[in-house]
Amino acid sequence: MDDILFRHTAIATPNDKSDDFLSRVAASDCAKKRVDDAKEFDELLKNSLKIDVPEDLADKIMLEQSFALERDKNVSARWHIAIAASIAFVIGVSLPIMNGILNSPGSLQFAQADIGTVALEHVKNEYFLTAKANENASLQTVNAKLAVYGAQAKEGLGEVLFVNYCSFEGTSALHMILNGEKGRVSVFIVPEDGDFKPSAEFSSDHLKGISEKMGKASLVIVGEPDEPLDMTKNKLQESIKWNI
């Protein structure tokens, strides 16, 4: 085996078992070192490619795919509703009699939004934006946001992965994401001026939630089906002082 072939074999397949290759390795310390270095590099590369797969990876992927399908359906539905609304508007402008009908007693009124339904939809719509968010928010940052709603947290709240204001069906609310027992838990603080229909417990195919009145605001907690939400609620009640 000539030098060029040996160097190529040593780099590409350092574990080659051919007689010519092994004879060349045995005949020279320099050749043996070249092969040992190549084997060490291969082992290093192999170890660097080993990535531990989370046990719940399949569930998380299925959840993301499910939310993506639901989001596409919702976009399509909103598009059709927008067209229908535009047609209705044109008819309303063209036929003044419609105004009399709409303004008369007993005319159609919009239903009061259910706070649980809004929370579930909010979590689904923002899932792709917050699923991997990890701001590691400090207690000071959390309290700066909570102060707007007349609340203050103390140590024991746990790991806060995300905290910011959000539009909760048009109402300015606070959205926190905590690290729960099984996964991420979304917590909403919704002021009473949102005028939502209360819902103590609610669920969908992939999420569940609970809500409770806190002074002049509602505390809404949403997590995955196996998440013990009562534990999160108790932790929040113990860790947050409400002045509302």
Image: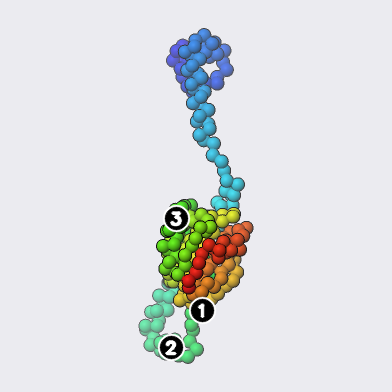
Q: Are marks 3 and 2 in contact (CB under 8 Å)?
A: no
Query: Which comes sooner in the sequence, label 3 or label 2?
Result: 2
Q: Residues within 10 Å of mark 2 (few under 14, many from 20)?
A: few
Of circles 1 and 2, the one toward us is 1
Earlier residue among tags 1 and 2: 2
Give the image location of residue 73, x and y in percent. Answer: 51, 63
Q: Is residue 16 placed above or below 190 in the rendered structure?
A: above
What residue did someone put label 2 on?
Answer: 103
Separation of marks 3 and 2 at Cα, in angstroms: 51 Å
Whether residue 78 is visible to the viewer of this picture, yes or no, is no
- Judging depth in this view, the residue of 150 and 63 nearest the camera is 150
The three-letter amino acid code for the residue at tag 1 is Ala
Q: Nearer the viewer, mark 3 or mark 1?
A: 3
Which label number is shown at residue 111? 1
Residue sitting at x 43%, y 58%: 140
Local secondary structure at mark 3: loop
Task: Mark 3 or mark 1: name the one nearer the start of the chain.
Answer: 1
Which residue, given by chain and number where applicable, does mark 3 sit on?
Answer: 138
Task: Estimate the spatial distance between the alpha carbons at disc 1 and disc 2, rounded to whole Å.
Answer: 17 Å
Foreground pick, 118 / 188: 188
Say whether marks 3 and 1 touch (CB < 8 Å): no
Residue at (55, 65) in percent of width and height = 237
Tag count in the figure? 3
Q: Is 244 left or right of 19, judged from the image as shown? A: left
Q: Locate residue 59, reporting x and y percent.
A: 59, 52
Label 3 is placed on what type of residue?
Answer: Ser
Q: Residue at x 60, y 58 (%)?
A: 227
Disc 2 residue type? Asn
Q: Does 170 appear above or below 26? A: below
Where is residue 159 shown, x and y percent of the image?
51, 54
Residue lying farthest to the left in this orientation: 93
Please tell me whether residue 31 is drawn above or below residue 206 in the rendered image.
above
